[in-house]
Amino acid sequence: MAWEWLTPEYERAQREGYERIRAKHPALVTVPFECYAGWHGIIQEYFDEVDRLLAEHPGSTYELLQVKEKFAGLRLYSRASDDIHEAVLAAYDRAARLSEVTCEVCGRPGALRNRRGAYMTRCEEHADGSVPTDPGLWKER
């Protein structure tokens, strides 16, 4: 049965992962994530990089607009001041490329899948909607 992994426990772990990232980067994470918890590690690395860029360039600005899944990949929409714009784009490109080979559900290696016209990046275990066997997979990378 599809989506069996989307349990109340998974949803709680997903919320906790978001809150953990938001607590680490409260000035950066200003909108909710519209993706599953398997990409939280990638998102964390992205915000770590943006935070580092802001620390290295005092006076620079960054505004998060949206974090979501689109076309089976992670999308991080933002605005950044000119001095860090290219570096933020590079961090975004790395995150997007990683998401294309990372299961959006659990964070393990994944591949692009087409399930009845819906594209997603999933590992073998979650390709058919099966229940994750290790809740620890939902935690930080």
Image (cartoon, grey):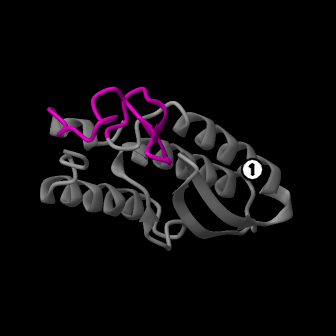
In depth, the one of 12 and 27 nearer the eye is 12
Q: Residue at x 62, y 53 (%)?
A: 50
Q: Does residue 68 appear to the left or right of 17 in the view shown?
A: right
Could you say where residue 141 lies in the image, as x and y percent from the top left? Answer: 36, 36
Q: Which residue is drawn at 34% across and 34% down?
A: 127
Q: Mark 1: few, some, or many residues within 10 Å (few <14, many ≥20)?
A: some
Q: Name the residue under label 1.
A: 89
Quarter of the picture containing the N terminus is top left
Q: Label 1 is placed on what type of residue?
A: Leu
The quadrant in which residue 138 appears is: top left
> Is residue 123 on the magenta stretch?
yes
The residue tagged with tag 1: helix, strand or loop?
helix
Q: Which residue is drawn at 65% across and 55% down?
A: 55
In depth, the one of 131 and 67 nearer the eye is 131
Could you say where residue 74 lies in the image, as x and y percent from the top left? Answer: 55, 49
Q: Does residue 129 appear to the left or right of 121 in the view shown?
A: left
Could you say where residue 128 lies in the image, as x and y percent from the top left? Answer: 29, 36
Could you say where residue 48 lies in the image, as x and y percent from the top left? Answer: 53, 48
Read off the magenta span. 106-133
